[in-house]
Image (tube, grey):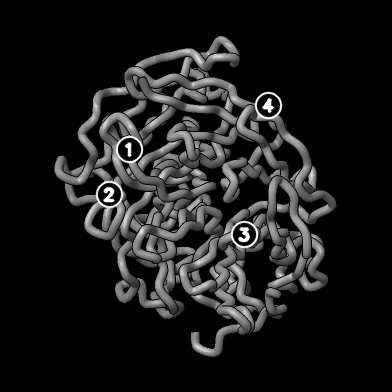
Amino acid sequence: MRSFVRVAVAAGLLAGVAACSDDASSGAPKQTVPASAAVDVPALVATRVQGGGDDPIQAPPGWTVSVWAKVPGARLLAWTPDKRLLVSRPESGDVLVLDQRGQAKPLVEGLNQPHGLAFDGDTLYVAESDQVDSFTYSAGAVSGKQVVIDNLPDEKSMELGGKYAHALKSVAVGGDGSIYVSIGSTGNVSEEDRDAEPERAAILRAKPGQPAETFARGVRNGTGLAIDPDGGLWTAVNNRDNIANPKNGDVEESYVNDHPLEPLARLTEGRDLGWPYCNPDPDLADGQISYTDRPFVRDVQTNPDGDKLDCSQLKPSEQGMGAHSAPLGLAFVTGVAGGYGDGALAGIHGSWNRQPPRPPEVSFFAWRDGTLGPQQTLLTGFQREDGSRWGRPVMAVKGPDGAIYVSDDQAGAIYRVTSS
């Protein structure tokens, strides 16, 4: 039996090129990537999605991309102990289970915007917008629902008056059984989130049998949440929009397009990712940009004098992605074919407010020496030259058959990606 946990506030508190860095459709300056840091693999080539439309996709040479299942609104993914694929569908309020042939049936229904999925043995955790549930899983069915974390904020929270920009939650389970859940900010810049109970724009942790407390803060919308091979917790963050140029205090499209970067950070207890007072800065002295080991600088709109938070004291962001990439699902995988090896896969949903738009893609980050290397594009081509899109990846996971499975909520599909 899983103990009931009530929320409390912590007392103290690829491929080749970096994603979107030199894509003509992105309009972004080229990212500087140390040659030793990226996986050396052949350039992507155009191929057709088998069972899909006429638009080509860019994939590693010899790889095949096919529509494995049609799942409207497919979001986050998780493999069951008996090798079935779970798919969350927030808009439908359900979680589907797919067999080895891609045939889907409801696993659990009637939920509030279910999003994050995580297993701990045969215990399945599902993150609803207002709580985290546990179920006992067996043979394509669940039983014994328990609420393990409740009172999470969403648009139904009375104090928020129906306004909540990032209600979807993600969940991960540590090796010690601790449950981590992402709590997005209520808006683009909503400073009151840092003083809320429970704290918003944060990652909460509930140790077994204990109340949930703030584990890391200043995480605007850490939808990507995953445990690395060493047991560390990582988050991929949707950062803020319409940031002012610190040189003149103006909000300029040319600056907003590439600032701030979207962090990919390893979280430790008490870590602060700065939002909304500090931003990870991609700028290098020579005018190029980098997303690796980038320091935080003060936000001239919310922290003009630096008195809200000393950004120089924040640990640099280990990795990152171009501004407005909108990373969603994050998963650590082993032995990706084609020379990629071990690493993390991230579903990049693409920008909604950048001109030209930041393209959606599936990104790969190599795992070496206990950390992640820079972003490399694994799959792209979901965006046409005119900026329109036929697909938007959400999450990518490696299956028990060695293939990579990718959810796409715009195309309503699960892709199966294999290599020859």
Vertical relation: 291 (above or below) 276: above
**Amino acid type shown at disc 4:** Lys
What distance separates the C-alpha of mark 2 from that of mark 4? 33 Å
Of residues 22 and 55, the one drawn nearer to the viewer in this rendering:
55
Neighbour tally class for label 2: few under 14, some 14-19, many 20 plus, Cα within 10 Å: many
Tell whether label 4 touches label 2 (CB within 8 Å): no
Depth check, mark 3 against mark 1: the one in front is 3
The residue tagged 1 is 376
**Amino acid type shown at disc 3:** Asp
Tell whether label 2 touches label 1 (CB within 8 Å): yes
Which disc number belongs to residue 373?
Answer: 2
Residue 333 x/y as whole percent = 40, 46
The residue tagged 4 is 70
Of residues 258 and 410, the one drawn nearer to the viewer in this rendering:
410
Which SS class for mark 2?
A: strand
What distance separates the C-alpha of mark 3 from that of mark 2? 32 Å
The residue tagged 3 is 122
Depth check, mark 4 against mark 1: the one in front is 4
Displayed quadrant of residue 335 = top left
